[in-house]
Image (tube, helix red, strand yellow):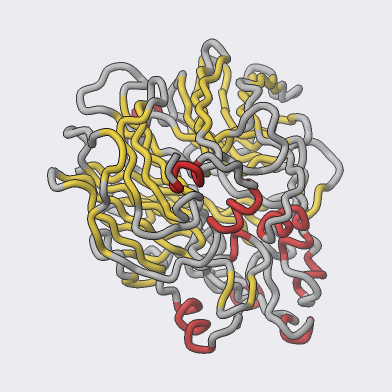
Amino acid sequence: MSAASAQENTPLDLAEVYLRSNEPVLDEVDTTLPVVEGTLPPELRGVLVRNGPGRMEIHGQRYGHPFDGDGHLNRFEFSPHGVAYRNRYVRTREFLAEESARKILFRNFGTNIPGGFHKNLLRLRFKNAANTSVVMHAGRLHALWEGGLPHRIDPHSLDTLARDDLGGALRNDRSLLERWMTPELPYSAHPRKDPDTGDLYNFGVVAGRQPALMLYRLDGAGACVQRERLVLPAMGFMHDFTLTAHHRVFFLTPTAFDLPQFLLGLRPPADTLHTRPGPTQILVLPRRGTQVRSFTARPCFIFHFTNAFEDGPHIIVDAARMDRLPRAGVVSKQLQGKPDELPNPRLTRFILDTRNNRSGRVEERQLSDHGGELATINPAHWTRPHRYSWSIGSPLQRRAPFSTGLLKVDAETRSSLFRDFDPHLTGEPIFVPRPHSRAEDDGWLLAMGYDPHHHTGELLVLDAADLRTICRLHMPHHSPLGFHGTWIPA
């Protein structure tokens, strides 16, 4: 057996693998990726762009939460010449300032400025990390972070072009106090596109004496043609929403921030986020207007929704459901390579019966026993009935929060297909339909991975129907797997 083969057969500690996979990216490169297994499909043409925290520290000072790392973009262009790869950090003004100072200068979701509470007292201008997602709409590529303005990115070079306030729609025009607290309105990292009109819907949660949900709609030309405001009963944590053919759906899970603690600079927001008593409240709004129909579900916590659609009098919502909010301390331990048990998200179908508005009846059906997150579907089924979804996943017996596999769930039969790549780590899959395909699962899954034996990133191209490898490409350096990406067809 060769030394390389022996190394690849040596059992690895997944906590150490995870820690190494999240080491800072030091190089920005332009290259063509070598295919190390299989063959590239000749029909696969377009660009995959991914976003996520590229570093969890600044010159030795550690960030306290995965949401705080500086935005780092990976671009993979599929052409007849192979796969051209490029990576760049998002040059936010905060990134440039901290690079110049070589230290943390701004508060963030899970990180206070070093130096105690007096350094953080009433410091409400948080760092825009531009690190959560990326979306292409109306010819503009935006790097997104849910607490502030999107950053416009050149889709070819990945150069950072501008902070984009959407023609002024994201400028706060309310009271002087509200403008001081939040001069730039939040714009979430999870917009949803209407496949029929091409309109892009999004939201943001504004803190204050009366917390509010900001609602946006961008038309096909990229203009913000709708901006609405809905007062919320409480200031909780809302990361995502979902869209049906006629409705917008928001889950108010029983979470809350300790506002005095983070306003006074005693703790960063993530450390004050906690579970509060009560059920999950589901708000159903029309596509236009803020008339709310409310439903009540069991207490839970949800980061991400898969899809939603209407089935006669029922609204169907698929989401990665957790029994409870993950504690900030557990997340911090994971960053330090000290894994603790996290609530395991499981794909769950929520069925809202709109015929009885008094009871607000909600039925829940768990669709898989496997833990799974960051789910994707065939984009032709956005806002419409879907059968299949794909996500990162873990073996049934694993309790630690590491994803080494990809999971396909059949909502019709409530069955799962899981493929484990252990000890390689896997990132969010993106479904790309095969040209002229008819079957819902006829296409490819594109997913970044981490190869611990070579300390490098990799790009997987899998058959979406059975999760077999079509080809695997090696990246020239490692890269944290990040959060979300988008596919831009050629």
Quadrant where the C terminus sits is top left
Q: Which sits in the foreground, 374 or 41?
A: 41
Using residue 468 as the reference point, say whether residue 203 is left or right of it.
right
Position of 45 with respect to 162 (left or right) is left
Residue occupying the point 32% across, 47% down? 48
- How many marks overall? 0
Q: Give percent across and percent down for residue 129.
A: 52, 67
Please identify the residue farthest to the front as the structure is shown: 1
Q: Residue at x 65, y 40 (%)?
A: 302
Counting from the top left corner in percent of width and height, residue 29 is at 30, 66
Whether residue 201 is visible:
no
| Residue 182 x %, y % | 60, 71
Q: Nearer the viewer, residue 103 or 147?
A: 103
* Residue 421 in sight from this viewpoint: yes
Residue most toward the top? 413
Q: Quadrant of residue 186?
A: bottom right
Q: Is residue 39 above or below residue 263?
A: above
Classify the position of the N terminus by image quarter.
Answer: top left
Instruction: Give the vertical position of 365 relative to 324 (above or below).
Output: above
Q: Quadrant of residue 160?
A: bottom left
The residue depicted at 72 percent of the width and 81 percent of the height is: 120
360 with respect to 99 (left or right)? right
Q: What x and y, as percent, mark residue 432?
A: 32, 34
Residue at 76%, 76% (x, y): give it. Answer: 265
Residue most extreme to the bottom = 101
> Please, which residue is most extreme toward the right here?
277
Query: Which of these two is toward me, 189 or 101?
Result: 101
Image: 306 above or below 349:
below
Left or right: 32, with 81 as reference point:
right
